[in-house]
Image: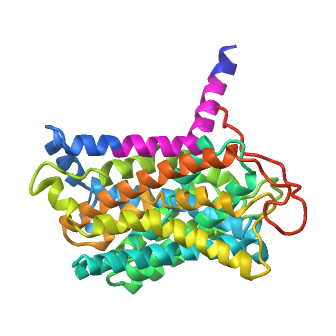
């Protein structure tokens, strides 16, 4: 009896940590704790903890704890993104271009419109120096968005989750490219080439019969450290490592290693990496210095919030409507345009990647803190509107041919409540 309990408890913890709702809830809690701590009488301790430096100086890894969270722990999250991307490209929704076309185009629209709105607003509000933050409202937080969908989307078609996942994966891929291209100041080529070489060795080991964690982990760390030394943001190493994992069964195995590695690493990403990053990134001090009033006066704050909410709804919904009306492309079975209203709001949940880009965009704390508040405000508004519209959509009657392709819908699967 005790043996069954001892084996079931770790299994239940594993399932809990892998649930889509877990990451979203923990992110919210971590952000709330950060804001409260950074504005409490003990805020000095928060600032000291964030600034505490640890790591070998000889390897240029003497980083603050906040730096380790952004550059180090977030690489774990990006590894999960990398294996998800690989799986989608090889066997998932991105494998068939015709089916992936609508969410891919929606993702592009959902990045272009928020960036355009952001640039227009900071220029009109008189802060052209903040244009460099144009990419902040373009990102979508996969973990947070899927968590909201899992909680409030019960009863809606499973195809809605697939559409959101495809869109968010493409969004993340584009965000990764933006970080690599636009937010890299200078490149040291020797460490970069060495990092890519180590990624190649990781790929060989990860595809071999001897793919053990005690071999893969040191290689992953070496690739990360070399990428960090090259000047390219270190999280890119996480994506590259994820992309080289085999997405089809090999060596006589029954399951692709992308799924195995995702299953192993996702709990660490959801329970440790993302919440710790949020804890160090969301703590904006509103009581010292010029305070909340000065931050609210920064044009970047409304520009980001409006970009995340209005830009995403116009970009995602507008592009999808145009594509499905003017071209032969259609939404997936059982999906209608009205279903994309909550999806568009879900993509306005920027959080993790948006907070990262905010830290990379500005050299001064004034712009960075205002941008962080803008991300938090836009995310809360978008998540609230997404939750409300998901329940609205779930309670409306559905037609026999929601995607209007002339064929009655056959996919009747719906999103069900997650169980422990």
**328 above or below 376?**
below
Where does the magenta region start and end?
6-31
Residue 141 is at least partly visible in this image = yes
Which sits in the foreground, 300 or 132?
300
Answer with the quarter of the image where residue 132 lies.
Answer: bottom left
Q: Position of residue 147 (x, y in %)?
A: 56, 46
Is residue 24 a member of the stretch shown in magenta?
Answer: yes
Q: Quadrant of the N terminus?
A: top right
Which sits in the foreground, 199 or 411?
411
Q: Residue furthest top?
A: 1
Q: Is residue 404 left or right of residue 193?
A: right
Q: Is residue 328 left or right of residue 293?
A: right
Q: Position of residue 101 (x, y in %)?
A: 71, 76
Q: Position of residue 292 (x, y in %)?
A: 18, 54
Q: Is residue 53 left or right of residue 105?
A: left
For image coordinates 75% across by 64% down, the residue present is 92
Answer with the quarter of the image where residue 96 lies.
Answer: bottom right
Q: Position of residue 260 (x, y in %)?
A: 68, 52
Q: Quadrant of the C terminus?
A: top right
For image coordinates 64% across by 61% down, the residue present is 340
For image coordinates 53% across by 61% down, the residue present is 347
Residue 210 is at least partly visible in this image = no
For image coordinates 34% across by 69% down, the residue present is 303
Which sits in the foreground, 384 or 237?
384
**279 above or below 190?**
above
Q: Is residue 286 left or right of residue 281?
A: left
Q: Residue furthest left?
A: 289
């Amino acid at each position: 009896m005790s043996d069954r309990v001892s084996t079931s408890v770790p299994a239940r913890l594993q399932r809990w940590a892998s649930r889509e709702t877990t990451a979203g809830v923990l992110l919210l809690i971590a952000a709330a704790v950060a804001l409260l701590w950074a504005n409490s009488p003990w805020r000095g301790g928060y600032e000291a903890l964030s600034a505490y430096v640890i790591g070998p100086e000889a390897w240029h890894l003497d980083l603050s704890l906040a730096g380790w969270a952004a550059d180090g722990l977030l690489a774990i999250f990006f590894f999960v993104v990398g294996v998800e991307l690989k799986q989608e490209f090889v066997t998932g929704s991105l494998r068939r271009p015709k089916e992936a076309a609508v969410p891919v185009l929606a993702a592009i629209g959902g990045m272009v419109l928020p960036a355009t709105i952001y640039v227009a607003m900071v220029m009109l509000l008189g802060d052209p120096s903040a244009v460099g933050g144009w990419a902040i409202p373009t990102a979508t937080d996969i973990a947070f968005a899927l968590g909201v969908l899992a909680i409030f989307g019960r009863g809606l078609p499973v195809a809605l989750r697939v559409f959101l996942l495809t869109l968010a994966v493409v969004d993340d891929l584009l965000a990764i490219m933006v970080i690599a291209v636009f937010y890299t100041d200078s490149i040291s080529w020797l460490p970069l080439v060495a990092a890519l070489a180590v990624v190649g060795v990781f790929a060989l080991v990860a595809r071999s019969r001897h793919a053990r964690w005690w071999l893969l982990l040191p290689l992953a760390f070496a690739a990360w450290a070399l990428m960090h030394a090259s000047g390219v943001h270190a999280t890119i190493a996480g994506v590259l490592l994820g992309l080289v994992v085999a997405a089809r069964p090999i060596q006589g195995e029954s399951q692709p290693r992308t799924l195995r590695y995702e299953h192993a690493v996702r709990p660490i990403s959801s329970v440790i990496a993302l919440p710790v990053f949020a804890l160090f990134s969301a703590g904006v001090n509103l009581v010292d210095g010029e305070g909340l009033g000065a931050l609210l006066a920064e044009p970047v704050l409304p520009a980001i919030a409006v970009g995340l909410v209005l830009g995403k709804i116009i970009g995602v919904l507008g592009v999808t409507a145009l594509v499905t009306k003017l071209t032969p492309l259609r939404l997936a079975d059982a999906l209608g345009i009205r279903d994309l209203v909550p999806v568009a709001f879900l993509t306005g949940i920027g959080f993790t990647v948006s907070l990262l880009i905010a830290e990379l965009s500005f050299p001064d704390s004034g712009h960075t803190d205002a941008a962080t508040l803008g991300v938090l405000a836009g995310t809360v508004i978008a998540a609230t509107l997404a939750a409300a519209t998901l329940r609205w959509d779930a309670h409306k009657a559905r037609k026999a041919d929601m995607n209007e392709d002339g064929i009655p819908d056959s996919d009747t699967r719906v999103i069900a409540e997650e169980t422990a």
